[in-house]
Image (spheres, rainbow, N blue to C red):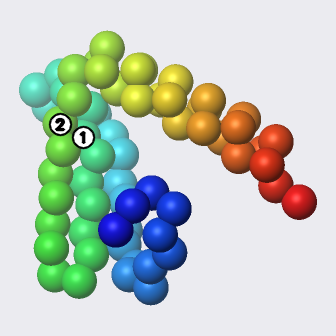
Amino acid sequence: MGINSESDIEANLQIGPTDQGMVRLYIEAQGVEIPMDFTPDEAEEIASEILASARTARGKGS
């Protein structure tokens, strides 16, 4: 499955700081729980990539 493949899988996403000074993306889907921790710098880089993707997607929308 690639980035352009559609899926019927539903997932919940939670984002927040941990008590260890990390930023956690927590994904839960079909009984699977995936916690992913990032340093604040890594989280800011991810946020920049999300914003850039949103701008690109907005330009491709109909």
* Residue that sits furthest to the right in the current view: 62
Say left or right for 4 vs 39.
right
Say left or right for 3 vs 40.
right
- Determine the residue positioned at 82% across, 42% down: 59
Pick whichever of labels 1 and 2 is earlier in the sequence.
1
Where residue 25 appears, x then y in whole percent? 29, 46
Closer to the camera, 5 or 49? 5
Q: Residues within 10 Å of mark 2 (few under 14, many from 20)?
A: some
Say left or right for 49 vs 27.
right
- The residue identified by callout 1 is 24
As shown in the figure, which amino acid type bears the numbered disc 1? Arg
Closer to the camera, 1 or 30? 1
Secondary structure state at the residue bearing disc 2: strand
Closer to the camera, 19 or 8? 8
Marks 1 & 2, CB-CB < 8 Å contact: yes
- The residue identified by callout 2 is 37
* Residue that sits furthest to the left in the current view: 20
If the image is split into quadrants, where does the N terminus sit?
Answer: bottom left
Is residue 45 positioned above or below 28 on the image? above
- Determine the residue positioned at 27% across, 75% down: 29
As shown in the figure, which amino acid type bears the numbered disc 2? Asp
When asked about the image quadrant of residue 26, the answer is bottom left
- Determine the residue positioned at 16% across, 51% down: 35
Is residue 5 positioned above or below 54 on the image? below
Where residue 23 appears, x then y in whole percent? 26, 32
Where residue 39 appears, x then y in whole percent? 22, 21
Q: Residues within 10 Å of mark 1 (few under 14, many from 20)?
A: some
When asked about the image quadrant of residue 36, the answer is top left
If the image is split into quadrants, where does the C terminus sit?
Answer: bottom right
Q: CA distance from mark 1 to mark 2?
A: 4 Å
- Determine the residue positioned at 17% across, 36% down: 37
